Image (spheres, rainbow, N blue to C red):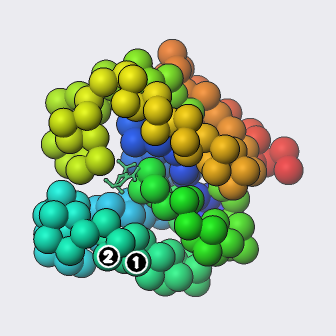
Amino acid sequence: MKLPYNIYLIGFMGTGKSTVSQYLAKYFAMETVEMDQEIAQREGKSIPEIFAEQGEEYFRNLETKLLVQLEKRENTVVSCGGGTPLRQCNVDIMKRTGKIVLLLADAETILERVKDSHDRPLLENNKSTEFIQSMLDKRMGIYRKAADFVISTDGKKIDEICNELIQKINSK
Ligand code: S3P
């Protein structure tokens, strides 16, 4: 499979974007870019360090800059940061250059997946289903409006999620 466009995985933190992108890269011979990882590497700092030292706005500008650069690629699965679709200009770039796939998970599932990690500044000291649910409520309209396809990940294995994704993409 070689797609003449990119697949952008969006969704809340802990919905499995990175895992899905790695699987697609391995089994469907696609290239992959993990936005947080790429930004951290370029800045020579972790995401929490960037947030603490330069602030969220600076980080959001780096996300937009990276997306602009990814426009030129194709057959690439881009694992976006959870906040990437919050800027309409980012959604515009993704729409123009690929298909946007929204991954969903319940607040309980998300908490379980993120509870032991410390690389997400917005969840640090906020690890509860109530907080996650309140952020989900604020963001879900934006996520759904941006998405070409929606895939629920709760209780599914990685191969089921990826096969569903490929099927949806091929059927359009
Ligand atoms: C964020 C999600 C994170 C990272 C940053 C902000 C967000 O990415 O970009 O901590 O605003 O939802 P992941 O969704 O890959 O964890």
Look at 25% across and 69% down and name the residue there: 55
Q: Nearer the viewer, residue 76 or 70?
A: 70
x, y (%) of residue 88?
63, 68
Disc 1 residue crowd, few under 14, some 14–19, many 20+, Cα 10 Å: few
Q: Position of residue 31 (x, y in %)?
A: 48, 64
Residue 54 sits above or below residue 82 on the image: below
- Report the label total: 2
Q: Is residue 50 above or below residue 166?
A: below
In the displayed structure, would residue 92 be above or below residue 156? below
Image-based side of 128 in relation to 95, left or right? left
Q: Is residue 52 above or below residue 100?
A: below
Left or right of 35 in this view: 9: right
Q: Nearer the viewer, residue 59 or 167?
A: 59
Q: Residue at x 20, y 68 (%)?
A: 50
Mark 2, Cα crowd under 10 Å, few <14 / some 14-19 / many 20+, is few
Q: Are marks 1 and 2 in contact (CB under 8 Å)?
A: yes
Q: Which residue is mark 1?
A: 61
**In the image, 77: left or right of 94?**
left
Image quarter of residue 19: top left
Q: Secondary structure at mark 1?
A: helix
Q: Which residue is denoted by mark 2 in the rendering?
A: 58
Q: Residue at x 30, y 24 (%)?
A: 128
Q: Which mark is residue 12?
A: none
Q: Position of residue 30 (x, y in %)?
A: 53, 59
